[in-house]
Image (cartoon, helix red, strand yellow):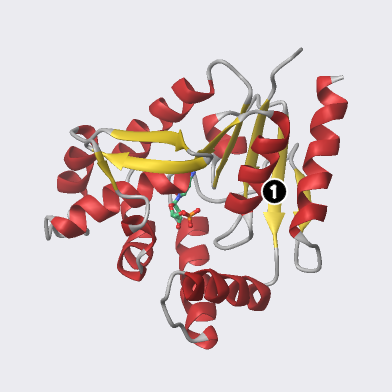
Amino acid sequence: MKRIVIAIDGPAASGKSTTARLVAGRLGYLHIDTGAMYRAITLKALQRKLDINDRGLIEDLARGSEIHLEKLNGALRVFLDGTDVTGAIRSREVTASVSTVSSYAGVREVMVREQRKLAGQGGVVLEGRDIGTVVLPHADLKVFMVANVRERARRRRKDLMATGIQANEEELVSEIEARDRKDSTRATSPLRKADDAVELDTSDLTIDQQVEFIVTRARTIIG
Ligand code: DC
């Protein structure tokens, strides 16, 4: 059976990760969270107390790092230079700096090369900001997920609270808007809907409905 490539892009907290994970599970595909890769480099820069505004320094850091995604006991784990950083990359400090780190062309070059390698065999669901436009412009199915910012802040707050972190919804709205602005206006591979992507507004959808929407389309393509 044909094993297709699915690209899911969209703004911050639009539900991409959960949806991509469940779609991959339903189809028996590999889920690749590309945002986690940018987060891992950001974490490394912060741990080393590097100036994240120093483009050259951060690009060198990315070139000298090994990021590895692995499915363990059904969950995706992220390894940075051999250390499991799955939890650490979700901190608010990393979230606040990742848009700057991911705006550097040298960083993106390293990540995109790795992402294309991972997608090479097909049977994958990649999620991020530039998958359908830059990383895999020939993906078999492209989905652009959106949701209103209030709903996205609410979901992000719920996720944070599940990990024991308290957050104010108004602050999250500002953070999400700031990140979207930065991700959409950067010079290299800005967040943009590919012309041939299907838009999925999840503001009023349940997770099951989002997953069903994508799986149905995927199955039509698989035939
Ligand atoms: O999906 P996320 O929130 O974990 O992504 C973190 C950041 O990484 C996001 O603000 C922008 C960047 N990113 C990117 O530039 N390109 C991608 N393909 C994925 C994420």
Quick check: 1 left or right of 42?
A: right
Q: Position of residue 203 (x, y in %)?
A: 76, 68
Above or below, 128 relative to 13: above
* Residue at figure coordinates x 37%, y 39% from the top left: 108
- Residue 113, quarter of the rendered image: top left
Quick check: 112 left or right of 136?
A: left
Q: Position of residue 105 (x, y in %)?
A: 34, 41
SS type, badge 1: strand
Above or below, 140 relative to 42: above
Query: Which amino acid type is shown beneath numbered disc 1?
Result: Phe
* Res. 206 in view: yes
Q: Position of residue 52 (x, y in %)?
A: 21, 58
* Residue at figure coordinates x 28%, y 47% from the top left: 41
Q: Is mark 1 within 8 Å of ligand 1?
A: no
Q: Where is mark 1, residue-wise?
A: 144
- Crowding at dot 1, Cα within 10 Å, few <14 / some 14-19 / many 20+, comes out as many
* Res. 102 in view: no
Residue most extreme to the front? 73
Above or below, 222 relative to 72: above
Above or below, 173 relative to 69: below
Q: Quadrant of the C terminus?
A: top right
* Residue at figure coordinates x 67%, y 49% from the top left: 19
Residue most extreme to the top? 1
Q: Nearer the viewer, residue 216 or 45?
A: 216
